């Protein structure tokens, strides 16, 4: 079985962007279909998307980073002062 290129941790990191992109795209698709007199729908949907995006950002910040990202910033991977 082939390994996935994107892990669930990576998807959690992009959760706020995914939420806002999906809701924004849905709003653009639904715009011609919804009656213009009922304009509160888009405002309420936009506020709900922003709250969901903030919640996703908080959840992503509480999720530990993958080990490879932590190792990338370690002092062993930085160039020594002789290279500067």
Image (tube, rainbow, N blue to C red):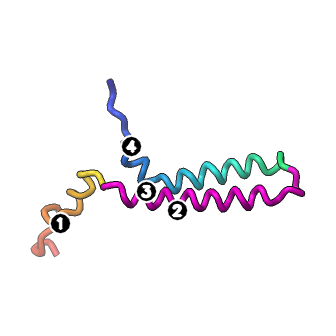
Q: Is residue 58 left or right of residue 49?
A: left
Magenta stretch: give its range.
35-64
Residue contact between numbered discs 4 and 3, judged by CB atoms under 8 Å: no
Image location of residue 81, percent across then percent down: 12, 75
Estimate how packed mark 4 is, as few (under 14), some (14 to 19) or many (20 or more) residues with alpha carbons within 10 Å: few
Real-space Cα separation, disc 2 to disc 4, in angstroms:
19 Å
Estimate how packed mark 2 is, as few (under 14), some (14 to 19) or many (20 or more) residues with alpha carbons within 10 Å: some
Estimate how packed mark 1 is, as few (under 14), some (14 to 19) or many (20 or more) residues with alpha carbons within 10 Å: few
Q: Is residue 37 left or right of residue 75?
A: right
Looking at the image, is mark 4 or mark 3 earlier in the sequence? 4
In the structure shown, which secondary structural element does the residue marked by tag 4 occupy? helix
Real-space Cα separation, disc 2 to disc 1, in angstroms:
33 Å
Looking at the image, is mark 2 or mark 4 earlier in the sequence? 4
In the structure shown, which secondary structural element does the residue marked by tag 2 occupy? helix
Q: Nearer the viewer, residue 82 or 56?
A: 56
Image location of residue 82, percent across then percent down: 10, 74
Q: Which residue is mark 2?
A: 54
Q: Which residue is mark 3?
A: 59
In the structure shown, which secondary structural element does the residue marked by tag 3 occupy? helix
The label shown at residue 78 is: 1
Front of the two marks 1 and 3? 3
Looking at the image, is mark 4 or mark 1 earlier in the sequence? 4
Residue 45 occupies which quadrant of the picture?
Answer: bottom right
Looking at the image, is mark 2 or mark 3 earlier in the sequence? 2
Q: Residue at x 35, y 55 (%)?
A: 63
Q: Residue at x 24, y 58 (%)?
A: 70
Which residue in the rendered view is the most extreme toward the left?
Answer: 82
């Amino acid at each position: 079985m082939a390994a996935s290129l994107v892990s669930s941790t990576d998807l959690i990191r992009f959760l706020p962007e995914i939420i806002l992109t999906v809701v924004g795209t849905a709003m653009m698709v639904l715009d011609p279909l919804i009656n213009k007199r009922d304009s509160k729908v888009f405002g309420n949907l936009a506020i709900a998307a922003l709250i969901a995006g903030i919640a996703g950002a908080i959840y992503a910040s509480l999720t530990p980073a993958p080990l490879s990202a932590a190792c990338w910033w370690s002092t062993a991977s930085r160039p020594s002062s002789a290279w500067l």
